[in-house]
């Protein structure tokens, strides 16, 4: 059972994600995480002024339970099932990141240059994370789904809209990392 | 109680996201640099099994645990909303290094600055609701 404390390889993780999608299908639900953000906006009263948030959010309580579980699962994964959280990415990637100023590459789960209180205290990391989040939330709702809803659920059902969205995800990601990162960092 | 099942599915999902490192900013960056097969392997193997399973469900007309037919809703046909929305999402995914599922996982894992991304994602969702009638769909 030692393997369980090591990072799980793709051929374990991928099939497990497919399994999660199928379990949800067999209990009559669709796998998708970003719709929870809309539900949360509605819970906070956004439906009073904006029609898009004026829906029966209680019908989405099941998905909020999945969210609560994902939080608990993160806690278990990090605190119970992991000895060393550092991510062994490709040494070439580490070299590129070190050039950009990410000295934590290869030594942490998330870059401490963005995801630490010291970093957040310097306004730059705070703005980067906030803008990143806004793009994620806006893009997921505008595009009708995120990685789970489009790349897994939608493409599994051979949906052309999901293919367009996933190509969009990748074009956006490539623009960010290859064109914008050198300007930002 | 059905809620417990959803909670357990979520816990399982959160563990898989964390342990596969799909919730790691570094893995997302490495993916967009094409310097590892890891993320492509995760998404690709999930997808291949997903396609096969969905075909089996459709052809055998399998039913849910409640005896209801499993319905697959086709997504609305459009180009612009998926292209523009997808592009915006991809920019954010690469910058913050997290997609919506892992955002929740990382909160539980104790990387609390991810809360800034979470609040941003709520704001972004709200902005979409605000501008929805003015955006091309």
Image: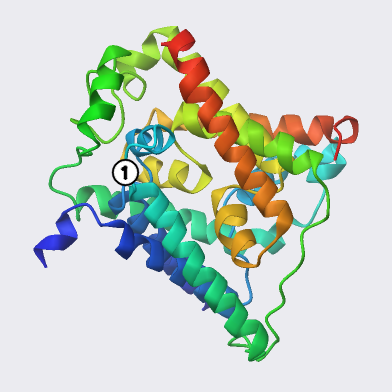
Is residue B4 shown to the viewer in this render? no
Instruction: Determine the image quadrant of residue A17.
Output: bottom left
Please provide percent x and percent y for residue B55.
Answer: 61, 79
Is residue A113 shown to the viewer in this render? yes
Please provide percent x and percent y for residue A33.
Answer: 57, 52
In-front residue for pair A144/B11: A144
Report the residue that reaches farthest toward the left: A2
In-front residue for pair B63/B28: B28
Q: Chain of mark 1?
A: B
Q: Is residue A53 above or below residue A91?
A: below
Please provide percent x and percent y for residue A1.
Answer: 11, 68
The secondary structure type at the circle numbered 1 is helix
What residue appears at the point 62 percent right and 50 percent down from the top-left corner? A36
Q: Quadrant of the C terminus of chain A?
A: top left
What residue appears at the point 34 percent right and 60 percent down from the top-left corner? A13
What residue appears at the point 75 percent right and 68 percent down from the top-left corner? B73
In-front residue for pair A149/A172: A172
Please provide percent x and percent y for residue B34.
Answer: 39, 37
Decide: few, some or many residues near mark 1? Use Cα within 10 Å; few <14, some 14-19, many ≥20.
Answer: many
Instruction: Determine the image quadrant of residue B127.
Output: top right
Q: Return the residue at label 1.
A: B109
Give the left or right position of residue A30, taking residue B94 as reference.
right
Report the residue that reaches farthest toward the right: B133
What residue appears at the point 40 percent right and 47 percent down from the top-left corner? B105
């Amino acid at each position: 059972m030692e393997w369980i404390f090591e990072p799980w390889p793709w051929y374990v993780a991928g099939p497990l994600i497919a399994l999660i999608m199928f379990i949800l299908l067999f209990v009559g639900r669709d796998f998708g995480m970003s719709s929870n953000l809309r539900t949360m906006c509605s819970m906070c009263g956004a439906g009073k002024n904006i029609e898009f948030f004026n829906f029966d959010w209680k019908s989405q309580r099941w998905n909020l339970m999945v969210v609560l579980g994902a939080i608990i699962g993160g806690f278990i994964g990090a605190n119970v099932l992991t000895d060393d959280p550092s991510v062994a990415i490709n040494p070439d990637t580490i070299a590129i990141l070190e050039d950009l100023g990410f000295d934590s590459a290869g030594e942490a789960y998330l870059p401490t240059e963005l995801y630490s209180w010291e970093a957040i205290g310097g306004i730059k990391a705070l703005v980067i994370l906030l803008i990143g989040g806004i793009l994620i939330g806006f893009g997921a709702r505008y595009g009708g789904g995120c990685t789970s809803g489009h790349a897994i659920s939608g493409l599994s059902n051979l949906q052309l809209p999901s293919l367009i969205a996933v190509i969009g995800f990748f074009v956006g990601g490539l623009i960010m990392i290859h064109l914008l990162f050198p300007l930002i960092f | 109680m059905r809620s417990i099942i959803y909670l357990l599915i979520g816990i399982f999902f959160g563990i898989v996201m964390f342990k596969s490192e799909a919730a790691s900013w570094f893995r997302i960056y490495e993916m967009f640099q094409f310097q590892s097969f890891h993320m492509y392997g995760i998404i690709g193997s999930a997808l291949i099994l997903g396609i096969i399973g969905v075909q089996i469900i459709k052809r055998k007309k399998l039913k849910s645990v409640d005896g209801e037919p499993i319905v697959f809703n086709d997504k609305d046909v459009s180009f612009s909303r998926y292209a523009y929305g997808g592009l915006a999402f991809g920019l954010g995914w690469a910058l913050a290094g997290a997609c919506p599922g892992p955002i929740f996982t990382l909160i539980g894992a104790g990387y609390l600055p991810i809360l800034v991304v979470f609040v941003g994602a709520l704001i972004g969702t709200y902005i979409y609701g605000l501008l929805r009638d003015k955006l091309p769909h």
